[in-house]
Amino acid sequence: MQYTGVLTKMRTELEDPIQYYLIFESDFINMNQLLNKKIQIEFVKYQCLGCGKNKKIFRQGYCYDDFYNKPQVGDWVMRPELSTAHLDIEDRDIEFEKKAQLQPHIVYLANSSNVKVGVTRKSQIPTRWIDQGAHEAIEIVEVPNRYLAGITEVALKEKVADKTNWRTMLKNEIVDENLVEFKNKLKDFIPEEVKEYFIENGKETEIHFPVLQYPNKLKSLNLEKTPEFTGVLKGIKGQYLIFEDNTVFNVRNNEGYVVNMKIF
């Protein structure tokens, strides 16, 4: 069986374990059903998520020109404290930015390789946690716009990490933490204008991933260096496919790449 399409991040459903779906233009694959099956991934060409052209992908699925022009990849996306839509100030496209920034956002703690603080739209809970490979997570505050979430993250990351060690996450070298206690210790460091949005009675969300075998060493698949790869799928965690030979493939990092995928 063979599928062809442009890669975008896998869609997920919060079940036990997480259900993963790879969506192509005219088809989709439930990736959980491919565990223990041999898969071949072949790089065909680029297809920018912005212009749709066969132009080398620069970052986040976009070619160089679109990365520096499209509102979907403005600086405020990675650095929410730079959001300005609440001030009616445009970055690249004020209508897009108002729609994206002026909606409820969550500042959260997630434990993937260590406890880290992060920001996402409320509508992206728990998707964001799943994408990061977190086995447990909890909400800290719910605020009405992205800017308030951003300044909260900036304040809290002086006390807790804001990065995930992806190697530790994929090896499953993890330690459970009491995130309720962790959250309560951070309460005093939340900016004054955000304190009223603190979530007092939050509970941890536990997440289980479909992994049959964790890698003990990691080899990251780069489609430009290795345009064709074949391996037996042993697990899925975060946005990574984990193969029997310890190769891992980050689907999200390869957005905008058109591939042939063959299942044996």
Image (spheres, grey):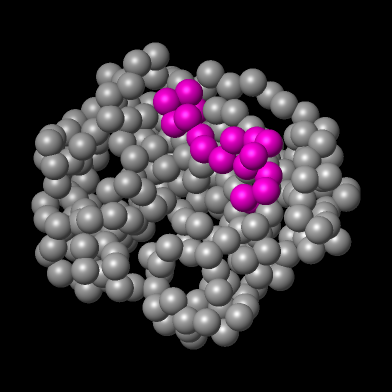
Q: Position of residue 255 (x, y in %)?
A: 29, 54
254 inside magenta stretch: no
Which quadrant would residue 65 be assigned to in this image?
bottom left
What is the quadrant of residue 242 in the picture? Answer: top left
Q: Is residue 88 visible?
A: yes
Residue closer to the observer: 85 or 118: 85
Residue at 20% in and 56% down? 57
Q: Residue at x 62, y 78 (%)?
A: 86
**Above or below for 77 versus 207:** below
Q: With respect to residue 217, does 101 lie above or below?
A: below
Viewer-side residue, 9 vs 83: 83
State the residue lying farthest toward the top.
216
**At x 47% / y 30%, what residue is drawn?**
165
Residue 160 image offset from top left, x and y in percent: 65, 35
The answer to whether 213 appears left or right of 184 in the picture is left
Task: Reply above or below: 175 against 67.
Answer: above
Nearer to us in this view, 193 or 113: 193
Per the rendered image, the range of residues in magenta is: 153-170
